Amino acid sequence: NPTVKYEITKRLLAANGQPISGQQLADDFGLSRTAIWKHIKELETEGFEIDTVKKKGYVLTSSPDSLQAAKIDQYLTTKRFGRNIHYQVTCPSTQPIAHQLVQAGAPDGSVVICEEQTAGRGRLARAWTSTQGKGIWMSVIIRPEIPPTKAPQFTLVAAVAVTRAIEEVCQVRTEIKWPNDLLINGKKCTGILTELQADIDRVQAIILGIGVNANQHLSDFPQEIQSIATSIQMVTGQPVDRAQLVARILHHLEIYTDLYVKHGFEPLKILWESYSCTLGKRIKAIMIHQTIEGMALGITNEGVLQVKTDDGQIHGIYSADIEI
Ligand code: BT5
């Protein structure tokens, strides 16, 4: 029973090294002590180290660096976001799972998260490398009351949320490269993928894919992206507590989503601009059918990038790959 296991894990984590009586757990969950013991044994196979102290009960001595709901839960400060977590050790990609959950009626703020993606994806069917246990690979289901045309702005909302979370939890500043990359020292540490399920005039759900490189070393990346990718640990030298970072991302994502739904992108714009490394620079915006080169002037209240070409014309860009 996954719910009981989850509750036991939560209790053990919350006990902070103090013993928890097996009898107490058995009483609370209406199970036999043997059934509780079986759950404890299962947790041990998942990497939890648990001592059995005679007459006192179970003591959690260490927990694995993993992203089970119970591990994230201990840091959660949100009302809705992350209150419904689907965890899998491995999956092709969290995005299609989240799409299915939307169809099944998953509530606002539901999260799909895993340790490893075997077919992680970026925009335009590009691949996203998602090494086992090294990063945060998650999809957040958001159900805002907005028209579908506004959905792309969620990429910017998410970029600000993740930037702030990384800054607070890992003490390192990331820069936002419009629209969906977070960089440290010019290298990509986070990618965001915004997908949508919608009726003609109404968003059913935004499926926000967030990939954060947390604890990789250079050799964990495939050769072809070693020169463009980085991880937080590679920069700070400190291992990242991924569960804590996930909880903080969800914290900011909930606040900024609510702010956005109420007041639009405008109140988030100043924050977004303060982290941007795109504005005020000469850039190349590469789109599917054309490339525009010029000065990145700013973003509009709708999050559209404005680029001034040498002939003085100003172009509004909705989505592109940017070269600086
Ligand atoms: C993105 O696409 O940056 C969006 C990445 C979204 C990943 C999340 S993880 C959870 C959820 N489930 C999924 O399957 N996806 C989402 P784009 O801007 O198209 O960038 C893709 C490019 O980034 C690739 O072509 C590589 O050059 C590079 N890249 C691939 N893996 C990377 C990594 N781990 N770190 C940095 N760069 C990477």
Image (cartoon, rainbow, N blue to C red):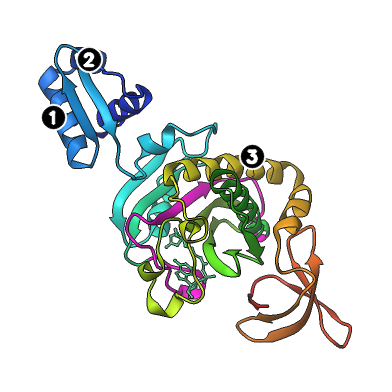
Q: Is mark 1 within 8 Å of ligand 1?
A: no
In the depicted structure, whether residue 77 falls above or below residue 116:
above
Q: Is mark 2 within 8 Å of ligand 1?
A: no
Spot the residue most to the front: 237
Give how far apart the Cα atoms at labels 3 and 1 are.
40 Å
Which residue bears the numbered disc 3? 255
**Residue occupying the point 57% across, 39% down:** 251
Q: Is residue 72 among the parts visible in the rendering?
A: yes
| Mark 1 closeness class: few <14, some 14–19, many ≥20 residues within 10 Å | few
Is residue 148 found inside the magenta-colored segment of the image?
yes
Residue 164 screen position, x and y as percent: 62, 48
In the rendered structure, which segment of residues is drawn in magenta? 120-149
Disc nearest the viewer among 2 and 1? 2
Q: Is mark 3 within 8 Å of ligand 1?
A: no
Residue type, label 1: Lys
Give how far apart the Cα atoms at labels 2 and 1 are.
14 Å
Q: Quadrant of the C terminus?
A: bottom right
Residue type, label 3: Ile
Is residue 264 found inside the magenta-colored segment of the image?
no
Label 1 secondary element: helix
Q: Nearer the viewer, residue 310 or 240?
A: 240
Which residue bears the numbered disc 2? 21
| Mark 2 closeness class: few <14, some 14–19, many ≥20 residues within 10 Å | some
Tell me the tag on residue 38. 1
* Lateral position of residue 59 relative to residue 138, left or right: left
Tell me the tag on residue 47. none
In the depicted structure, whether residue 255 falls above or below residue 195:
above
Q: In terms of sequence position, does the residue under pointer 3 or pointer 2 come before the other?
A: 2
Residue 235 screen position, x and y as percent: 52, 60
Q: Quadrant of the N terminus?
A: top left
Q: Nearer the viewer, residue 297 or 19?
A: 19
